[in-house]
């Protein structure tokens, strides 16, 4: 039986969303949280984008140091030889890549305006795959953009040829959220059976079905005899109406009627980290968690009406499918109600030592504290809001990595 793995794309789809973005430190914290949660891979960024290079290399160093382990860190690029070359030039240590190309007639005709045929798409994709392999990439996945609007025969040809060229997975992109659970189940089962390769499900919420489609697609892949990799984002943040919400996908697979018996995760997922990761992403993106968000919304375990309150007090299972403690909720949170000293880009040494002292972090000497304070100031220049305790702890623990994350050097000419 195939298994289910999570491949989170918050640091790629999430950050390319209109009005939203993350600092390189925040992206790193997201990778740390995803690793803690048991996510298989984080699509951690864009290796062909110059301002990502230091961040990507610093995170690969954390991986080498055993900090970001066992999570895989995958880069997203276009499926062209040019992008592959540039990715390995800017981030030579990159090991995992997803190569993306449009496969639907709509996009081939609409984007390339007649300059490319289906045959050209196949040739471009295969050359890019060969180049990635030649550079020694450990895992290569090929993304069929707009797969749900792609002619099935062409999609089968595309996937089979990619498999012959040695790709590890096909990413089935429901780029516009066009599928429904029945259509994606059928298509992905067919792909799994006919191509015989692991498949990623990349679903969007334009019709409100991102989670349902991801789960149904994964069921199809597993029923077709292959492993399924569900693409998620934290709090469902992503292009337009967003992607499949990480926590909702986990809840659906663990708690929905009969699912967990047949469709299992390939590695343990720590749902208990849900509260923490969602709260952090919400703060980092500056996007509040919806009051009715599954599992982590303010109302997810709130009961007001007489019948519900009475029922849940007698036995929580009367009106709750799962316990709030399973998601890491219920711990008291410290909120300062009196004097508050926070970190900022103009912080001084005594205020800083006060903040760190509250977190029981002491420095060997004043010079040592001043070095860390300098990094904290720079982190604040980028964040433009107080750093959270986990970020401060990270800076203290990995000052060299932090320095890399904070270094942005625009060049006057492209090279
Ligand atoms: Zn997407």
Image (spheres, grey):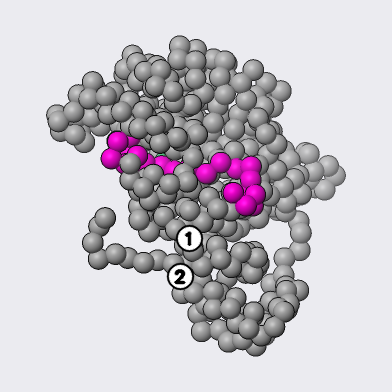
The stretch drawn in magenta includes residue 16: no
When the figure is inspected, residue 35 is found, relative to residue 364, above or below; the finding is: above
Secondary structure at badge 1 equals helix
The residue sitting at 52% across, 23% down in the picture is: 198
Residue under numbered circle 1: 24
The 10 Å Cα crowd at callout 2, few under 14, some 14 to 19, many 20 or more, is some
- Determine if the magenta segment contains residue 83: yes
| Residue at screen point 25% across, 57% down | 414
Is 48 placed left or right of 318 in the picture? left
Q: Is residue 23 above or below residue 178?
A: below
Quarter of the image with the C terminus in it: bottom left
Q: Quadrant of residue 162?
A: top left
Query: Mark 2 sits on what residue?
Result: 382
Q: Nearer the viewer, residue 289 or 70?
A: 70
Q: Which residues are magenta?
A: 64-84
Going by the picture, which residue comes out furthest to the top? 194
Direction right: furthest residue? 314
What secondary structure is marked by label 2? helix
Residue 76: x and y in percent read 41, 42
Q: Do the residues bearing badges 2 and 1 touch, measured as CB atoms within 8 Å?
A: yes
Name which residue lies at 56% across and 66% down.
Answer: 400
- Would you say the beta carbon of the disc 2 residue lies within 8 angstroms of ligand 1? no
Disc assigned to residue 146: none
For residue 409, what is the image quadrant?
bottom left
Tell which of 206 and 310 is nearer to you.
206
Image point 72% across, 70% down: which residue?
Answer: 334
């Amino acid at each position: 039986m195939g298994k289910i793995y999570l491949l989170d794309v918050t640091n790629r789809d999430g950050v390319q969303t209109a009005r939203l973005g993350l600092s390189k430190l925040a992206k790193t914290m997201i990778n740390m949280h995803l690793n803690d949660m048991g996510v298989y891979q984080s699509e951690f960024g864009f290796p062909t984008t110059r301002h990502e290079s230091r961040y990507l290399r610093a995170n690969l160093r954390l991986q080498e140091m055993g900090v970001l382990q066992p999570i895989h860190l995958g880069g997203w690029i276009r499926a062209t030889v040019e992008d592959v070359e540039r990715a390995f030039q800017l981030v030579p240590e990159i090991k995992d890549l997803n190569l993306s190309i449009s496969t639907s007639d709509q996009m081939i005709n609409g984007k390339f305006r007649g300059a490319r045929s289906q045959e050209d798409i196949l040739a471009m994709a295969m050359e890019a795959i060969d180049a990635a392999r030649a550079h020694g990439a450990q895992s290569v996945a090929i993304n069929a953009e707009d797969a749900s609007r792609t002619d099935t025969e062409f999609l089968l040809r595309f996937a089979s040829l990619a498999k012959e060229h040695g790709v590890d997975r096909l990413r089935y992109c429901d780029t516009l959220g066009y599928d429904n659970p029945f259509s994606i189940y059928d298509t992905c089962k067919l792909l799994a059976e006919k191509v015989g390769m692991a498949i990623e499900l990349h679903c969007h919420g334009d019709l409100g079905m991102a989670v349902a489609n991801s789960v149904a697609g994964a069921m199809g892949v597993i029923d077709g005899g292959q492993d399924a990799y569900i693409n998620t984002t934290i709090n469902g943040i992503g292009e337009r109406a967003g992607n499949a919400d990480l926590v909702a996908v986990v809840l659906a697979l663990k708690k929905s009627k009969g699912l967990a018996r047949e469709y299992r995760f390939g590695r343990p997922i720590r749902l208990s980290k849900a509260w923490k990761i969602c709260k952090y992403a919400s703060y980092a993106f500056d996007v509040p968690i919806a009051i009715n968000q599954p599992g982590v919304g303010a109302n997810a375990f709130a009961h007001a009406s007489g019948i519900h309150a009475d029922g849940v007090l007698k036995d929580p299972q009367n009106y709750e499918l799962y316990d709030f403690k399973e998601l890491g909720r219920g711990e008291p949170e410290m909120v300062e109600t009196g004097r508050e000293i926070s970190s900022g880009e103009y912080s001084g040494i005594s205020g800083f030592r006060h903040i760190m002292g509250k977190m029981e972090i002491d420095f060997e000497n004043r010079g040592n504290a001043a070095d860390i304070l300098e990094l904290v100031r720079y982190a604040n220049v980028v964040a433009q809001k107080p750093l959270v305790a986990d970020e401060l702890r990270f800076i203290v623990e990995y000052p060299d990595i932090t320095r890399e994350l904070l270094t942005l050097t625009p060049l006057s000419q492209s090279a």
